[in-house]
Image (cartoon, rainbow, N blue to C red):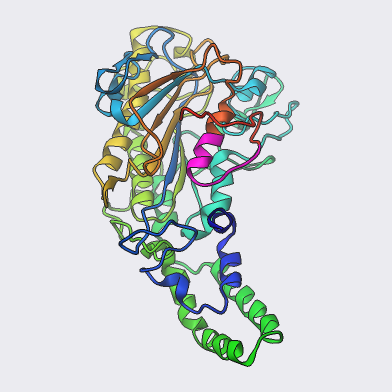
């Protein structure tokens, strides 16, 4: 029953609970399939955050060995040193479909789905893990998912594949990349600007319609209960509108109910470091206020044109720099990992009952290739956070010599931590049991 509740939308839950009046909204009762606790309330939800940077990393400095506090990290991963006990470094996973096309586009467009890609400028990939989970859980928050970026999409074609594949990691359907928000102010507005939600109104319409059909087939006693419910519809309408903000759907309240940062200025920040930090801050706010539980942040495109004058590296764009193993390339690599460390530090500073927000999050960091010379036979993967107490960090998992090393096995494992269990995702039929 628990998994069934997690699989149905808010519309379905309201329709199914039509005669229970306000029961789903009582904080002392667990709902949405949560396990009951002795205190009567529900635990904080698990969040999913995915960060991506294109073009891979320094060929000699992405590595990790050892366990826990004794884990040793290569120079690329050095910014994560403080979080060794709360992360997994996973080696050897790959995406078979990414090896069938060209470089860059076909190595990125299906990174989060493992789906075959259409060539010839046509757009067809697969629904990504973040959007699959948003479809399952999006009804419980104001914003089902955030898809953020720091570099504009590229609409051109490269080596017979659309560069939209290089520009998007989140796909709402096989033919629809999730609209990417690169303006911090608009991303902030999406989380916190108050306006009518037409979807909630349609929920009430469905409830009333179901109630009318139900009334014809129930006993006199149940009709009386149903009448009480209909009298409370107006109140329920207001509760639905505020449910995502107050956390009432879980019987759990977020630690913050209003943004604690000013709205960013309009436009795109000229400083790429400021741009990335603003987007990270918005992800934190979205999670902390329970306005969203699913977020992707694409720090740059694959085949990226970003420059880094803030690092003293202004003479070469990211893509060209990726073909070198210079000190400047390492400096740029570390800059990207510093964004992950910044996000982890902010999440870990927010206490949610016995755990921190980082402990209640799965934070995946990945790229389209291991190194800048298009090496995609294994992918760079870091998984941070505790997934609500379901993930044990401080480990290096190595699948390089394993026969079943599909990246999609990791996604099956991650979905399992959010109580979504599928027989197959992409090219994988079994999760990674070690995760």
Give left or right: position of 306 versus 166. left
Chain part drawn in magenta:
412-423
The vertical placement of 78 against 281, above or below, is: above
Give left or right: position of 173 versus 368. right
The vertical placement of 291 against 181, above or below, is: below
> On the image, which quarter does residue 120 sit in?
top right
Find out whether residue 270 is within the magenta segment. Answer: no
Q: Is residue 188 visible?
A: yes
> On the image, which quarter does residue 63 sit in?
top left
Q: Is residue 169 visible?
A: no
Give left or right: position of 284 versus 17. left
Q: Could you tell me how many numbered marks the image carries?
A: 0
Residue lying at 65% horizontally and 89% vertically, measured from the top left = 219
The vertical placement of 58 against 215, above or below, is: above
> On the image, which quarter does residue 393 sit in?
top left
Residue lying at 58% horizontally and 60% vertically, measured from the top left = 9
The vertical placement of 179 against 262, above or below, is: above
Give left or right: position of 134 versus 214. left
In the rendered image, residue 143, in percent from the top left (x then y), is placed at: 48, 55
Q: Nearer the viewer, residue 272 or 341?
A: 341
Residue lying at 50% horizontally and 49% vertically, measured from the top left = 145
Residue lying at 69% horizontally and 19% vertically, measured from the top left = 101
In the rendered image, residue 308, in percent from the top left (x then y), is placed at: 36, 22
Q: Nearer the viewer, residue 317 or 173?
A: 173
In the rendered image, residue 373, in percent from the top left (x then y), is placed at: 53, 10
In the rendered image, residue 62, in percent from the top left (x then y), is placed at: 40, 14
Q: Residue furthest front?
A: 38
Find out whether residue 416 is within the magenta segment. Answer: yes
**Quadrant housing the N terminus:** bottom right
Q: Nearer the viewer, residue 273 or 351?
A: 351
């Amino acid at each position: 029953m628990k998994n069934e509740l997690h699989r149905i939308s808010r519309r379905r839950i309201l329709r199914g609970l039509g005669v229970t009046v306000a029961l789903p909204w009582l904080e002392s009762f667990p709902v949405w399939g949560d396990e009951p606790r002795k205190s009567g309330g529900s635990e904080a939800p698990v969040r999913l955050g995915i960060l991506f940077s294109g073009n891979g990393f320094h060929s000699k400095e992405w590595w990790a060995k050892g366990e826990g506090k004794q884990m040793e990290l290569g120079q690329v991963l050095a910014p994560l040193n403080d979080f060794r006990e709360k992360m997994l470094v996973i080696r050897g996973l790959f995406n078979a479909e990414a090896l069938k096309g060209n470089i860059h586009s076909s190595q990125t467009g299906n990174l989060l789905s493992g789906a075959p890609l259409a060539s010839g400028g046509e757009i067809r990939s697969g629904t990504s893990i973040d959007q699959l989970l948003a479809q399952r859980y999006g009804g419980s928050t104001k914003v089902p998912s955030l898809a953020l970026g720091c570099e504009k999409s590229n609409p051109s074609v490269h080596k017979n594949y659309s560069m939209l594949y290089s520009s998007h990691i989140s796909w709402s359907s096989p033919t629809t990349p999730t609209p990417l928000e690169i303006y911090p102010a608009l991303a902030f507005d999406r989380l916190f600007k108050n306006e009518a939600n037409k979807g909630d109104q349609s929920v009430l319409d469905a409830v009333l319609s179901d109630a009318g059909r139900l009334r014809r087939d129930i006993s006199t006693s149940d009709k009386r209960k149903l009448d009480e419910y209909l009298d409370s519809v107006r109140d329920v309408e207001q509760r639905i509108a505020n449910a995502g903000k107050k956390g009432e759907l879980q019987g759990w309240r977020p630690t913050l109910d209003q943004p604690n940062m000013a709205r960013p200025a309009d436009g795109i920040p000229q400083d790429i470091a400021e741009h990335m930090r603003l987007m990270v801050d918005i992800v934190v706010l979205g999670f902390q206020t329970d306005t969203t539980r699913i977020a992707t942040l694409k720090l740059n495109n694959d085949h990226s044109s970003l420059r880094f004058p803030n690092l003293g590296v202004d003479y070469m764009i990211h893509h060209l720099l990726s073909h070198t193993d210079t000190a400047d390339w390492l400096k740029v690599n570390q800059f990207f990992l510093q964004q992950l460390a910044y996000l982890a530090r902010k999440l870990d500073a927010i206490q949610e009952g016995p755990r921190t927000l980082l402990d209640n999050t799965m934070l995946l960091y990945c790229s389209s290739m291991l190194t800048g010379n298009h090496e995609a036979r294994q992918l760079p993967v870091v998984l941070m956070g505790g997934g609500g107490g379901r993930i044990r960090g401080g480990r290096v998992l190595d699948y390089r010599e394993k026969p079943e090393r599909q990246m999609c096995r990791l996604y099956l494992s991650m979905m399992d931590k959010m109580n979504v269990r599928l027989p197959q995702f992409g090219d994988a039929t079994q999760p990674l049991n070690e995760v």
